[in-house]
Amino acid sequence: MFVAPSILSANFGKLDEEIKAICETGCDFVHIDVMDGHFVPNLTIGPVVVDAVNKIATKPLDIHLMVENNAFFVELFSHIKPRFLSFHIEEEKHPHRLIQKIKSYGIKAGIVLNPHTRVEEIEYLLEDLDLVLLMSVNPGFGGQSFIPSVLEKAERLKELVIKRNSKVLIEVDGGVSDKNINALKSAGVDIVVAGNYIFSSNSYKDAINSLRV
């Protein structure tokens, strides 16, 4: 299991120390939630802060856009060259075009599904995607409880990935902990995003290692 700590739950008063700590203790990606206050009722960080994170991080960035006007934000973050750049299918009228735009910058493209969105809605896009992120909480805030129905959803998505002979990775974000990590692994999940579970722990290393199943 790959682990991507979400800096949404980090202490922003010492963000440089937090980034160094999770990278040194062995995370696989640094997950960054970009919220615009419109698509979700919260406002987080922009390219200036992400640029700073990118300079400090020794692990690849995984940027999750929770915004309106996805194409504008893709342009805004394209120079940072994260490993993954993902957008919500619920907010995009031309997903295939946007996927190609992301890939034109040499970035792996991902699509995000809210808890209520069926995986069948993106089946026709799987061959073009590198990542599908399933939200296991309603997007916008950290520290929420895991929605168990995402396990069945991940299993269905895995079936579609195999059916389409796709190499897409499955990621889950929201309420991830050592209590549900084995079930997520069994459901076919490849990457987990964990914020509060890691950053509120006494040992970032132990928390990250507990998710490696």
Image (cartoon, grey):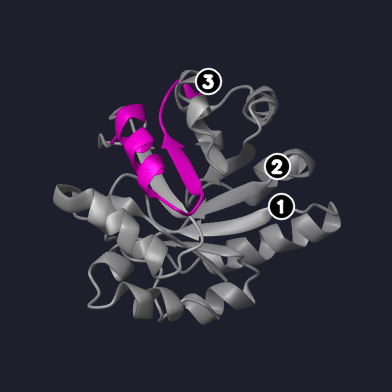
Mark 2 element type: loop
Report, in whole angstroms, how far the alpha carbon at label 1 lies from the one at label 3.
22 Å
Q: Nearer the viewer, residue 18 or 123?
A: 18
Magenta-tinted stretch: 45-70
196 with respect to 130 (left or right): left
Nearer-N-terminus badge (1/2): 2
Quadrant of the rendered image containing residue 109: top right
Q: Tag on residue 185?
A: none
Q: Amino acid at mark 2?
A: Leu
Q: Amino acid at mark 1?
A: Val
Identify the residue at horizontal 76%, vertical 56% (top origin): 161
Report, in whole angstroms, how far the alpha carbon at label 1 lies from the one at label 2.
6 Å
Vertical placement of residue 165 versus 72, above or below? below
Q: Nearer the viewer, residue 81 or 76?
A: 81
Q: Which residue is mark 2?
A: 129
Residues at discs 1 and 3 in contact (Cβ within 8 Å): no
Identify the residue at horizontal 52%, vertical 77% (top origin): 212
Q: Which residue is mark 3?
A: 71
Vertical placement of residue 68 versus 51, above or below? above
Nearer-N-terminus badge (1/3): 3
169 with respect to 139 (left or right): right
Residues at discs 1 and 2 in contact (Cβ within 8 Å): yes
Question: Is 89 included in the stretch rendered in magenta?
Answer: no
Q: Residue 13, image x and y in percent?
A: 14, 49
Q: Residue 12, image x and y in percent?
A: 19, 48
